Amino acid sequence: MSLEIVNGGALTTVQDLGRFGYMNKGFQVSGAVDDQAMRLANILVGNDQKEAVLEATIMGPSIRFTAPAVIAMAGANMTPKLNGTAMPLYEAVEVHAGDTLVCGFAMTGCRGYLAVAGGFAVEPVLGSRSTNLKCGLGGYEGRALKTGDVLELRTEKATLPHMEKRKVNAAEGSFQTPVSVDKLPVLRVVPGPQSEYFTEKGQKTFAEQAYTVTQDSNRMACKLTGEAIEFVTSGDIISDGITTGSVQISSSGMPIVMLADHQTTGGYAKIGTVISTDIPAIGQRKPGEKVRFSYISVEEAQKLNLERKKYLDTLDKKING
């Protein structure tokens, strides 16, 4: 069974949880920007949570199926239509040979995820099926999908047990990112590792002001604009390691939040790190939308991460046994 790409959308790539253990060789981790949506889509179709999915950005793809399959979409609402009829998000759906799925502009969110029962038959590269666009490796020929591409499945599944319970309320779960009084997502941040490079005023500004996502944001980083964050003297440091969620402050005082395709090292001081639980929230913000930040402790971050894992594992067991 295969999926034929009728239209690749703005940017559609094959992604899993990422390529770990090779940053010392210069390879980015890559992987799904919103790992929560990716995991939920996989759970709904009975896949391992780590299975590769299609990640679409801003404008989704159009896909034709050549045989029966079970699919699910999560993340951004790209108003998917199956043979012209609206398809629900966060619910497993059976498709038949000749069916066409058409996704549009992301009405809410920024990135949508399509999982197919059985998983995509793309070869792992350095232990991952994720697409690294900068290096041109992994995924489907190391690039975004385009018209005419054909993706095969490792295992064909026309249906799954208990289809009626393969749905989820996307808003449930205590791990959800909180919102401020002005309804903006509040991204929780562990301070440092270069907090001393910022004045008390600068750190207060970061934690109290709203910041807007800029047009040049991408899978590498979410760039923000707003009130400048004040340095003690300068934000330049000797380049050191970067991780997903690292918040660099540019020389102009603007925050840059590192995402899945972030570089391995960087020379801007880092005021904090967005916790892994909240990376999906910033990954789903489109240019022009705003976020806020709030400091929490490492212990709080670890507790939230464990709560999210417990929620997803419990949901997986409930749906798939």
Image: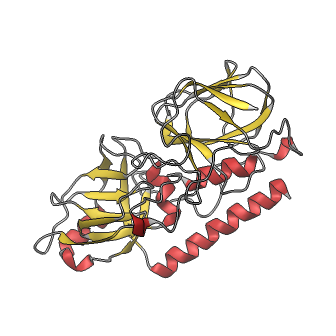
Answer above or below: position of 91 versus 126.
above
Q: How is the image coloured?
A: secondary structure
The x and y percentages for residue 112 are 55, 40
The x and y percentages for residue 236 are 17, 69
Query: Image check: 137 left or right of 191?
Result: right
Query: Image check: 210 left or right of 142?
Result: left
Residue at x 50% of width, y 65% of height: 276
Residue at x 68% of width, y 30% of height: 3
Answer above or below: position of 197 versus 61.
below
Between residue 175 and residue 29, name the one nearer to us.
29
Q: Quadrant of the C terminus?
A: bottom right
The x and y percentages for residue 47 are 75, 51
Between residue 172 and residue 248, name the one nearer to us.
248
Residue at x 30% of width, y 40% of height: 215
Q: Quadrant of the N terminus?
A: top right
Between residue 308 and residue 29, name the one nearer to us.
29
The x and y percentages for residue 255 are 27, 59
How many marks overall? 0
Query: Does the image show residue 171?
Result: no
Query: Does the image show residue 318?
Result: yes
Query: Image check: 65 left or right of 111?
Result: right
